[in-house]
Image (tube, rainbow, N blue to C red):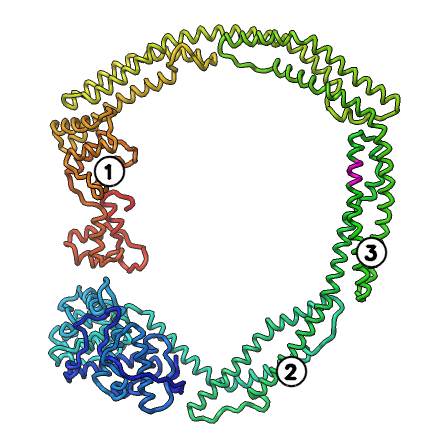
Amino acid sequence: MVDYHMTGGSSSSSGGRGGYISAEGKYMEQDDEWDRDLLLDPAWEKQQRKTFTAWCNSHLRKAGTQIENIDEDFRDGLKLMLLLEVISGERLPKPERGKMRVHKINNVNKALDFIASKGVRLVSIGAEEIVDGNSKMTLGMIWTIILRFAIQDISVEETSAKEGLLLWCQRKTAPYKNVNVQNFHISWKDGLAFNALIHRHRPELIEYDKLRKDDPVTNLNNAFEVAEKYLDIPKMLDAEDIVGTARPDEKAIMTYVSSFYHAFSGAQKAETAANRICKVLAVNQENEHLMEDYEKLASSLLEWIRRTIPWLEDRQPEKTMQDMQQKLEDFRDYRRVHKPPKVQEKCQLEINFNTLQTKLRLSNRPAFMPSEGKMVSDINNGWQHLEQAEKGYEEWLLNEIRRLERLDHLAEKFRQKASIHESWTEGKETLLKKKDFETATLAEIKALIRKHEAFESDLAAHQDRVEQIAAIAQELNELDYYDSPSVNARCQTICDQWDVLGSLTHLRREALEQTEKHLENIDQMNLEYAKRAAPFNNWMEGAMEDLQDMFIVHTVEEVDGLITAHGQFKSTLPDADREREAILDIQRQVQKIADLNNIKLTGGNPYTTVTPEIIDSKWAKVQQLVPKRDNALKSEQDKQQSNERLRLEFANLANVEGPWIQSKMEEIGRIAIEMDGTLEDQMSHLKRYEQSVINHKPNIDKLEQQHQLIQEALIFDNKHTNYTMEHCRVGWEHLLTTIARTINEVENQILTRDAKGISQEQMHEYRASFNHFDKDHTGALGPEEFKACLISLGYDVENERQGDAEFNRIMASVDPNNSGMVTFQAFIDFMSRETTDTDTADQVIASFKVLAGDKNFITAAELRRELPPDQAEYCISRMAPYHGPDTVPGALDYMSFSTALYGESDL
């Protein structure tokens, strides 16, 4: 908040301004304009002056001041600006220095500018008139402020501010006898309305039943005293003035009543005010100790500076990066942890000093003089020396870290390259000394040679890394790195190992090339064997697979074809035996060459995994499978001949029962549509028809028995009939279901007729209309068929906009599952439902909400006030307690009660 006892920067603005205000938000209606002529009424002016003064003081006391004369105390603009700051919670520009007229006008203009910034248009109210003490303009301006900040935000059910405040008063005082609030003047003269407002919110403060309408002065004084004592609402009106005036001032009454609205609707404001007072008291108590706190804080801060500067001036370097980083971390810790509190202490010290000097100066006391050496200037000098030392220390730290960082970077680079090289050379000597080529095949020898060539290329590529390692070691020696001996030793080890690897690489290449020549001759023989063995092996595997294949046939013709193909296969066996002998002879020649040249053949033929043993084993297997295949084919031929006889027997029965079921389905469809007579006659006819169909069941059972034999024989097709057992079974079940459904529909029609009082003629009429539009005779209407039926009955569902909405509503009721079809039963239910009228749970809930004043709960008092006694007690005894938000003691849940009336679990 701006201190209006201090001087500030000057500002100037023109003084011309308007008088009557109207807000952008239209918080007052046209008939509420303040009128200069009305202000000439002495009685009204006296009431406004007293009320407006008390209202202003109720806010100014929060800033520790008040006004005595409303015309005089706002002339310099200071308390006017302070009042606006208090009621708005915002800061205004600083007031101008001086007591001249122009300074006062500028201050008042700042206040008027602030009012205008809140959406208020001022007409005929100027700063000059306020400065001149114009009573009418001053009262008009205060009324403008009251409207904007105390009344404008009041809104009940989207009404204007005045109407909202009036509606609030009417609702709160409605239950009270002798109270009828219709305005803000004569409705309040007897004082009962004020007492009713207090009693409605704080019944323990007022004994309303003891008040008398013929004693208005007592009533008014009682309300004013209780409001001032218990509600912290200052006394803004005089009971004698209100009673002695034919028509009390409306603005004074509205101002005072708005204080009740804010007191009751914003209880939190009282707590906020109390907190503000505690805060002011705490600041005052703190100011009493500022001098002592300054001395202590200054001594502590100077002592910390004297201890810290020697530490910052220490420039002893460290050998390792880790030690220097620890110094840097200590410095950063100083910056992050130790110094910030001291910076805050220094800042707080200066703030306390300035605040103390200001308060002493305003109270005409001598300025505070700290002890010698503890002036703010002394602390600033010490702080400057500290920051200079801090800057030098930081620069030294960074330079040393950069130097050690370069050395650590080179050392780390040396270690990384050395580690990579050592990792690469690990196991290389062992690999080069291996004798794996002595027992290798030709392919393995060639692979080893290619692998060795790749190793030689890799070895050459690593030559550059070895040279880099040596160069880095040399640079570390030149820079006098502290760990140079270990670097040199590691570098020498790497160079020695490099020479050994070069020698072993040359020896291994010579051994590999000599072994390769000995194995090339044998390789040619192995290749020839592999080229002939592979296709022969594939032929034998295919033959074994065919001979063991689990053939699946369904006819005699198919098994005869398999027997013919098997005979053709047996005729190829002699040629296959001659090819087998030729392949085995190649392998015998290879072994002979290896024995003559002392070559160790390990791992078999590199070009194939088919050994002579495998060939002999598979050939023997083929010889065993041929006669087994002969027997299996003969057995399958006998089985298929038996299956064919079963197919013919089933087909003879199915070709009779299938058409019979189809004819019955068509017949029941016609019966359902064409039935006439009474519903009871139709029911009797359907029962007899159902029994005649059930009597046919033994024929279906015989077909099932024949089908069981078909299934046991695993027969899945039958070219002698188009009817499967599944078709016949489903058709039979569908026939029985259709008959039962038709009977059930007639039963439901009888129930509907009896329950709804539908005559037999109406039922016939409904059936005729339904059948007429059921073009496909399915027993149900599609959407378009149903719409045509509704149009014929007089429903307006053809309109493109409203008609579609009405049709969708009707479809939702007759087809709740969205099946797209409307049954005859749903059609009858709809027609009977359209002729009745019922209340809904939603309507009852809406009615209860009106009685509850738009709350989600209702009280017993409200029920007894609004309903007849017996019905009120009925509701109170059955309503459950309300446990929702904003509940009050005795609140009842009318929503659950309403849904229970209709048996609904949820709205």
Q: Is residue 468 above or below residue 321?
A: above
Please, what secondary structure does the residue beneath circle 3 have?
helix
Label 3 packing within 10 angstroms: few (<14), some (14-19), many (20+): many
Q: CA distance from mark 1 to mark 2?
A: 91 Å
Q: Residues within 10 Å of mark 2 (few under 14, many from 20)?
A: some
CA gap, disc 1 to disc 3?
Answer: 93 Å
- Residue drawn at (13%, 74%), measured in percent from left and top? 186
Q: Which quadrant: the N terminus?
A: bottom left
**Circle 3 is placed at which residue position?**
491
Name the residue that disc number 1 marks. Answer: 813
Q: Is residue 882 toward the left or the right of residue 610 in the image?
A: left
Q: Amino acid at mark 3?
A: Cys
Measure how far apart labels 3 and 2 are at the Cα level. Answer: 51 Å
Of marks 1 and 3, the one in the foreground: 3
Residue 152 versus residue 448: which sits nearer the camera? Answer: 448
Q: Quadrant of residue 13?
A: bottom left
Q: Position of residue 328 (x, y in %)?
A: 67, 70
User: Would you say 218 lies left or right of 600 here?
Assistant: left
Q: What secondary structure is the stretch in magenta mostly built from?
A: helix
Element at label 1 = helix
Counting residues from the start of the chain, the first of labels 3 and 2 encountered is 2
Look at 72% across and 17% down and name the residue there: 615
Which mark is on residue 306?
2
Residue at image x 19%, y 81%? 47
Q: Is residue 505 visible?
A: yes
Badge 2 amino acid: Arg
How busy is the neighbourhood of tag 1: few (under 14 within 10 Å), some, or many (20 plus)?
A: some
Amino acid marked by disc 1: Ser
Whichever of callouts 1 and 2 sits on the residue coming sooner in the sequence is 2
